[in-house]
Amino acid sequence: MNYEQRLIAAAKFVYAGDSDADDSPVNSVDLEVKATLKPHQIEGVSWLVRRYRLGVNVILGDEVSLPTLRPAFN
């Protein structure tokens, strides 16, 4: 299996896992988060948790934090 085929297989695996996933939002109390999360933050954390359960490594960033992270990848 070449690189492109592996990449396509991995994408199908993640998409299938997303469609099978429980879409209920993460409860911040279960994560022992002390702060009150905004709806977009709950959505982001839920996305991260779904990826973690699938065994997929991801980074969640936004336009504010990405410029500060970029030097770490160079």
Image (spheres, rainbow, N blue to C red):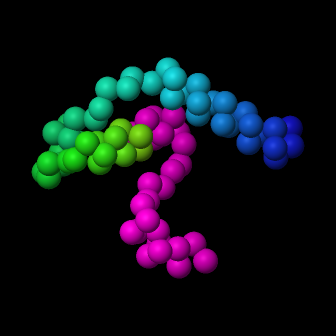
Does 30 appear above or below 59?
above
Q: Nearer the viewer, residue 70 or 56?
A: 70
- Left or right, 54 with reference to 28: right
Residue 52 in percent (x, y) is at 45, 41
The image quadrant of residue 30 is: top left
Q: Which residue is drawn at the image coordinates 41% and 40% (left, top)?
A: 47
Q: Is residue 61 magenta?
A: yes
Residue 5 in percent (x, y) is at 81, 38
Residue 15 in percent (x, y) is at 59, 30
- Left or right, 63 with reference to 70: left
Q: Which residue is drawn at the image coordinates 39% and 23% (left, top)?
A: 22
Q: Which residues are magenta?
A: 49-74
**Number of numbered discs visible in the structure rendering:** 0
- Left or right, 64 with reference to 25: right
Q: Quadrant of the N terminus?
A: top right
Q: Quadrant of the C terminus?
A: bottom right
The image quadrant of residue 44 is: top left
The image quadrant of residue 43 is: top left
Does 26 appear above or below 20?
below
Residue at the extreme right of the image, as rendered: 2
Residue at the extreme top of the image, as rendered: 20
Q: Which residue is drawn at the image coordinates 38% and 26% (left, top)?
A: 23
Q: Is residue 3 magenta?
A: no
